[in-house]
Amino acid sequence: MCSSLPHTTETVTCTEMAQRLNLVVSRHFSKLTSLSSTRKLTENVSSKPQTASGSEITADHLLYTPEHFALKESLKKIIDQDINPYVDQWEAEGIFPAHKVFKLLGNAGFLGVNKPVEYGGLGLDFSYSIAVSEELGNIRCGGIPMAIGVQTDMATPALARFGSTELKKEFLLPSIMGDKVACLGVSEVGAGSDVATIKTNAVREGDEYVVNGGKMWTTNGTQADWMCLLANTSDGPSHKNKSLICLPMNSPGVHIARKIDKMGMRSSDTAEVFFDDVRVPCKNLIGQEGMGFTYQMLQFQEERLWACGNILTMMDNIIQETIQYTRQRKIFKIPVLYHQSVHFRLAELETEIELLRSLLHRSTALYIKGNDVTKLASMAKLKAGRLSREVGDSCLQYWGGMGFTSDVLVSRFYRDARLLSIGGGADEVMLSIICKYMDTLPKK
Ligand SMILES: Cc1cc2nc3c(=O)[nH]c(=O)nc-3n(C[C@H](O)[C@H](O)[C@H](O)COP(=O)(O)OP(=O)(O)OC[C@H]3O[C@@H](n4cnc5c(N)ncnc54)[C@H](O)[C@@H]3O)c2cc1C
């Protein structure tokens, strides 16, 4: 297996890779013995929930094993020590240092938990990726988790699945190691929801594609080293004329037109990018020419489940912080929390969160067994977007004027989570997909 690895890449050698893998796996999983004995002890002592959700740390979790929990625990330490202390600064600056943060996560193995071992991944199944997405929800903003998710579960799944060995060595391996930042170029100024109508072209000339056009809303776009680009490679029917291509962002003719100023996700840079006769080797094609639309639709499934996992933890945290705040804030001589309309509403929201968690874990369990979960993933994404808006709005209300300040997490969540009903397929697009599976769309 090691012979397939590059010997002198900018990232690692074979020996280094083997050492790193041993280190990462043992670092995450060495806690398992103590973890399980601790769990038995606490279960005997108390029947109270271990976490906010009351469903996380249980020996009989439906999806997660002690290994999942060990991985989450390791990631939590990095978040607490190396990310959260800087989030306010990065939010204020409108960008975070992607190379620095990704290198940190790459060294610890978190940028490729379900990617092949040959390319630096941990070779685990997609449920571990969902566990990571849930843990990343503990970062105190939406922008940085989203940027990490683009790297791990939006720009790279198709490459890992369909890319050639050579392409994976050049783009996947350094992305997993945290040496290269990836972005995903699907949306354009004139085509977001209707992906089939994109206008960017990649025309073959000899052994190169010549790319012309532009991409809009590109997360990580001002910092990325390469783009997973969706472009038209022929004039055929719009679902069969597209291809995914790995496009180095330092190629002549790539212009970063601007960094878009946004109401939320402020620490994540979002770019508008233009391509002016950009020449890319044809070997940078992912899989088969003309299969790009299909690959992208597959890639979207992981993106949507990932986004759902990530927002679940954020919603848990917002509910918990709201409980803490309203418990100590007194109005009309009693804590805000003790007004029935408040604690009943929080209970309603918590119930919905638990239902969404069940849907996510069920969808993930079916997905890792090889089932098509398009309908369930679309439902999960739809519900995640809508529920996070409700959680943000209701919780912010109970913080009163404090909720309207920039000093509290709830106002950042309110702004950041709004994207979920738009990005990665708007709610209406999710509804259309669900209707398609229900066979209720009007016939053309
Ligand atoms: C912060 C941010 C980061 C992003 N990151 C990326 C990225 O990294 N890569 C990338 O490729 N894209 C990215 N996007 C783009 C995102 O996926 C699109 O914004 C999204 O798909 C919607 O496309 P649009 O903005 O063009 O809206 P439009 O397609 O113009 O749609 C507008 C609205 O029309 C409604 N609508 C859509 N379809 C229907 C329908 N069938 N019936 C009724 N109403 C409908 C919806 O309410 C929708 O919001 C990002 C966007 C943002 C804001």
Image (cartoon, grey):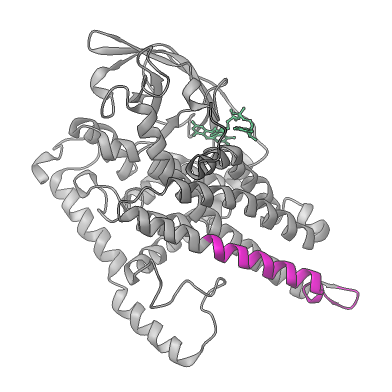
The residue furthest right is 332
Residue 108 appears left or right of 220: left
Q: Is residue 398 left or right of residue 308?
A: right
Q: Is residue 179 visible?
A: no
Which residue lies most toward the front here?
Answer: 443
Dominant secondary structure (helix, strand or loop) of the stretch shown in magenta: helix
Residue drawn at the location 73% of the way across and 50% of the way down: 406
Is 401 placed left or right of 391 in the picture? right
Residue at the limit of the structure toward the left, as seen here: 3
Up/down of 431 relative to 404, above or below: above
Query: What segment carries the magenta color?
Result: 331-356
Q: Residue at x 16, y 43 (%)?
A: 13
Quarter holding residue 331: bottom right
> Where in the figure is residue 305, as x and y percent of width and height?
46, 50
Q: Is residue 432 visible?
A: yes
Q: Quadrant of ligand 1?
A: top right
Which residue is at 37% across, 59% downward?
365
Residue 271 in the image: state x and y as whole percent.
53, 27
The location of residue 206, given as percent across then percent down, is 23, 8
- Is 382 above or below relative to 257? below
Q: Is residue 242 above or below residue 326?
A: above
Q: Out of 115 and 347, give the one closest to the viewer.
A: 347
